[in-house]
Amino acid sequence: MDHAGRRARAAARSGAAGVAALLLSPGSDLTYLSGYRIFSSERLTCLVLANDGTSTLVVPELESPRAIAAAPDLAPVTWGETADPYALVASLVPGGSGAIGVSDQMWASFALGLQRALPGREFRLASEITRELRMRKDPAELDALRAVSAAADRAFGRALDLEFEGRTERQVGADLAALLRDEGHDEVMFTIVAAGEDGASPHHQTGHRVIRNGDTVVLDFGGTRAGYGSDITRTVQVGGRPTAEAVQVHDVVRRAQEAGYAAARTGATAQSVDAAARAVIAEAGYGDFFIHRLGHGIGLDGHEHPYLVSGNEQVLEPGMAFSLEPGVYLPGRFGVRIEDIAIVGPDGRCEGLNQVDRALATVR
Ligand code: ZN
Ligand code: ZN
Ligand code: ZN
């Protein structure tokens, strides 16, 4: 990953936007611009990227070995346990009246501390600068997304051999997590197993419900590999013999996703892709039961720009990556969702990174 090139582009954009420096604490913007991935803690870690291109990584002394290993091209400036890291960061910010861009994921305690240390400066969100860069993935990022999506596909393929009937959602969820790791994920971020009526809650909290023969089950799971996320949903039927309505709803959702694929191309707006998929579901009479946007961008964050949602006029371009995940949720009964991660390719067409079969598969 070309972190130095990304920093140069971010610095140039900052200068053009009247931002004196970006202040990035642990989170995806920091990782994007430096390669450094670190948990957030009460000790301030902050990349100071001035608009002249100078970058300094301010780190707590005890974390400097880790920081040097992760971002060897950034000489860290360390602070000891009793020092004032806010004064240190402020001393690295170019003087004058330029604004300060703080990472969207910065803890409020740090943002307020930096505001006190830099009185009179305008504070803005760093995403004003980083969003445009991060939305257009470079080839190395697209390779990372391909690899992690392929791993999720393999995990789903093996999940079809799991035993569902008589086990709890949680037990199946633990199996899904193990499959993700076994297929090459570094971290598992979520495993939604939503059986029967639980499937009507799109972000169901996988619980103790026992899965029964005849249940339609929504499986939505993902994690990260080399920092980049997977996110896949398939809906399965326990024991075969789905109801006629489950078959019908599944077919509607599948056709809605195909409409999304066809609409997602260079030059289309994000909202037009949502509208194309939504129209299929509305025509089938289920419009009131598709209660979320069609998709979200994905990369270093599991949800990021661009969002495929009504009102978003963002124009799609090659290198953008997002989910296509229509669903129908029938309260008290069942739900169906099908989700792939897709990218806009160099030819302007949408390419699915998840290719594992989308049919309403039978599980035991
Ligand atoms: Zn979701
Ligand atoms: Zn998902
Ligand atoms: Zn998703």
Image (cartoon, helix red, strand yellow):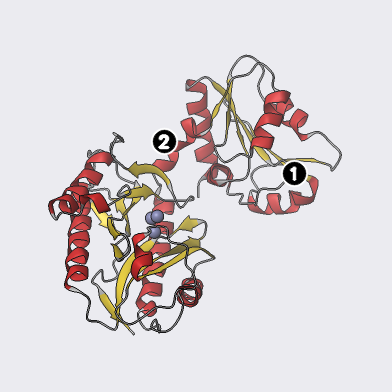
Point out the quarter of the image occupied by ligand 1: bottom left
Between residue 74 and residue 354, name the one nearer to us: 354
Closer to us: mark 1 or mark 2?
1
Question: What SS does tag 2 mark?
Answer: helix
Q: Is residue 158 left or right of residue 187?
A: left
* Residue 56 seen in render: no
The residue that mark 1 highlights is 43
Label 2: few (<14), some (14–19) or many (≥20) C-alpha neighbours in 10 Å: some
Q: Is residue 187 above or below residue 118?
A: below
Residue with the mark numbered 2: 132
Q: Is residue 222 left or right of residue 70?
A: left
C-alpha span from label 1 to label 2:
29 Å
Q: Position of residue 141 (x, y in %)?
A: 43, 52
**Within 10 Å of the Cα at label 1, are there few (<14), some (14-19), or many (20+) other Cα atoms?**
some
361 and 88: which is toward the camera: 361
Say what amino acid the circle numbered 2 marks.
Glu
Task: Report x, y in % for residue 28.
Answer: 54, 46
Q: Find residue 215 and name its label.
A: none
Q: Position of residue 5 (x, y in %)?
A: 50, 39
Residue at 48% from the left image edge and 27% from the top image edge: 13
